[in-house]
Image (spheres, rainbow, N blue to C red):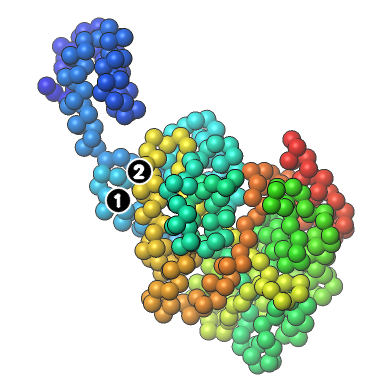
Amino acid sequence: MSDHLTPSDEATPAAPAMTHLLSDALRLRESRRSTLKRAAVLGLSVPAVAAALGPARRARAQDPITLTWFAARDPSGYTQQQVDAFNAQNPALQISYQEQGATTTDLHDKFVTIASAGDESADIVSMDVPFVPEFAAAGWTSNLSEALPDVERDAFYSGTIEGATYDGEIYGIPWYNNGPGLFYRKDLLDEAGIAPPKSYDELVTAAKQLQTADRSGFIFQAAQTEGGLISWLENLWGHGGEILNDEGEIALGEGTAAVDSLTRLVNFIYTDKISPEATLTMATGPDAQNVFVEGRAVFLRMWMTATAAMDADTSAVKGLWDVTSLPSATGTEPGPGCLGAWMLGISANSRYAEQSAEAIRFLTSVEQQTARYLGNGSLPARTAVLEDEEVRAKYAYVDRLGAAFESLKPRPVSPYYSQMSADVLQPNFAEVMTRAKEPEQAVNDMVEGIEQVLNS
């Protein structure tokens, strides 16, 4: 029997029905018994279907399964190398790596479009922390709690597990980590006998003492972007405040932390004058990072992944910088940094959930996270990576990473966070930073806006 219908078969009226039946059976991975039952209902020859089904299944079984991975852009190109390594090791299971546009928003919007339509185009999806609750609540991603049992979760930094969790269940496996630090000119602080600041007041004092006409005291993002908003969230946490409490209820209006933290950032620019007004236009990380790398700032709040640029041969501060935890209002504890981890999830519409989990186990393994950190500087979500001898030899600052990662916090874990950020928090933050609105009024407007989002 040939693997395909013969010309004489094609001439029979039942041939199209049989062709569709066999195609559906293979595509849906239907059992032999179910296929034969459907053949009888359709009035097809059960023996003929049975004869055709076996060779067709054997031919199909020889074809590799291809998983489609919806991912964000990786300028380093390293992710494709990891995919190539997986594909070389797994001839029967291949990954098609597909970057969705130039920005994280492009990835988000493309996945939402296909997921909401029940489209099977994606199997694996890369997720920024705010995507996790949004996708899970909508039923667009699969519950992965069994794929990452409790006994295995201790191998990851606790913040990454918190960021992968929605409603008590795991919906993503931590792939790589990121968090901020307070970068500083070690040469300048050492020469002046100044210790790295632990409080906001100490930061102001040190920045004022060391800044010059050509060198700003403190650089941070203050534009109306998610990056700018994160600058405020970290200061809010550093003052003891929250947007939402553990029950998902609005906590922003409680106490004075929200007003105090906004006032603090405004004062950095207009009162203390340690930050230039140019921070208002720093929409991306590199916008802020480059000022420090070029030697034009004493302090910088930036993601730890900036270390590669600072140690580059073209860096004006190579060998002159160091990094510490973010400051806080009191200085008694480090200021919490925003969790910037990325997760890998499985589309709820995927036909290959089990195979997708296998690929994710490879990509998130300690071996691959170690290789990725060494290869392109993507910080690990697994604690064991920082103990690797090659890692410690290449990155002298790894001991400070562990402490910083333990204090990371995710942005509000809510399926509505993206809407809160874009429609309520960012606009009010920007109005405060440009002195178009007083902090007190902005906080009141934020609370009212969040209520509308949650109740809509």
Could you tell whether 158 is left or right of 188 in the image?
Answer: left
Dot label at residue 355:
2
Up/down of 235 relative to 7, above or below: below
Residue occupied by mark 1: 87
Secondary structure beneath dot 1 equals helix
- CA gap, disc 1 and disc 2: 13 Å
Secondary structure beneath dot 2 equals helix
Up/down of 246 relative to 264, above or below: above
Q: Are marks 1 and 2 in contact (CB under 8 Å)?
A: no
Q: Quadrant of the C terminus?
A: top right
Residue 386 image point, x, y percent: 45, 72
Could you tell whether 133 is left or right of 451 in the image?
Answer: left
Residue 266 image point, x, y percent: 81, 66
- Going 70% across and 47% down the picture, which residue do you hit? 248
**Crowd rating for badge 1 (residues with CA inside 10 Å; few <14, some 14–19, many 20+):** some
Q: Quadrant of residue 440?
A: bottom right
- Going 56% across and 44% down the picture, which residue do you hit? 108
Judge whether residue 1 can be spotted in this image: yes
Depth check: give the residue in front, 165 or 100.
165
Could you tell whether 58 is left or right of 332 in the image?
Answer: left
Closest to the camera, between mark 1 and mark 2, is 2
**Crowd rating for badge 2 (residues with CA inside 10 Å; few <14, some 14–19, many 20+):** some
Up/down of 264 relative to 46, above or below: below
Could you tell whether 423 is left or right of 89 in the image?
Answer: right
Q: Residue furthest left?
A: 1
Mark count:
2
Q: Quadrant of residue 231?
A: bottom right
Identified by mark 2, the residue type is Gln
